[in-house]
Amino acid sequence: MKAAVLERLKAHLDSRMQAALEAMQSAQSSANEETKSSAGDKYETARAMAQNERDRHAQLYDQIRQERAVLDRIDPLFEFQRVGLGTLVKTTAGYFFVAVSVGLLDMAGTKVIAVSPQSPLGASLMGKQRGDSFLFQQKKCLIEEIG
């Protein structure tokens, strides 16, 4: 199941990257159009706003690209003894995949929560092994399997 979760996350990030790239290009096009028709301060403000929008989408694109690079470094066949980056963890609270924070994934009826190692939940799982406990939503949970 770990390989399927990893592929689903990659596809999700690829889709978000494409949307951010298209929004960035659209904002750049708007900024360029404002330049062509500018006649005064009103148009300079509109151009600056379009440029700010483009920059915001560029930052989002870069963030998603970095998250995608994290996923590319994960070997889906590696078997972990302790929770680390790329670990699928079965617990009494459900399944967690430690990689990037995407949230809830439905994997053919099995719910998997994708969390980053920096998130509070991810940080509480890091380094744990089978049989260890951790807190999730103020409940003590047990790690049943690590993959």
Image (cartoon, rainbow, N blue to C red):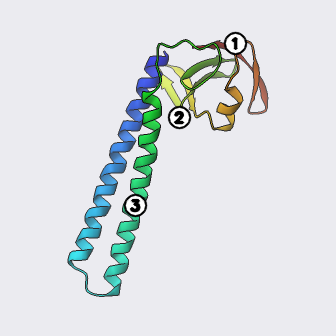
The residue labelled by disc 2 is: 100
Q: What residue is rendered at 41% in x and 24% in y?
A: 7
Compared across the picture, whether 78 is left or right of 96 comes to left
Query: What separation in Å lies between label 2 and label 3 (alpha carbons)?
Result: 23 Å
Residue sitting at the far left? 36
Q: Which mark identifies residue 130?
A: 1
Q: Amino acid at mark 2?
A: Val
Q: Label 1, secondary structure: give it.
A: loop
Q: Amino acid at mark 3?
A: Asp
Q: Earlier in the sequence, mark 1 or mark 2?
A: 2
Q: Residues within 10 Å of mark 2 (few under 14, many from 20)?
A: many
The spot of residue 32 in percent (x, y) is 25, 69
The residue labelled by disc 3 is: 55
Q: What residue is rendered at 43% in x and 35% in y?
A: 69
Q: Quadrant of residue 73?
A: top left
Q: Label 2, secondary structure: give it.
A: loop
The spot of residue 107 in percent (x, y) is 48, 21
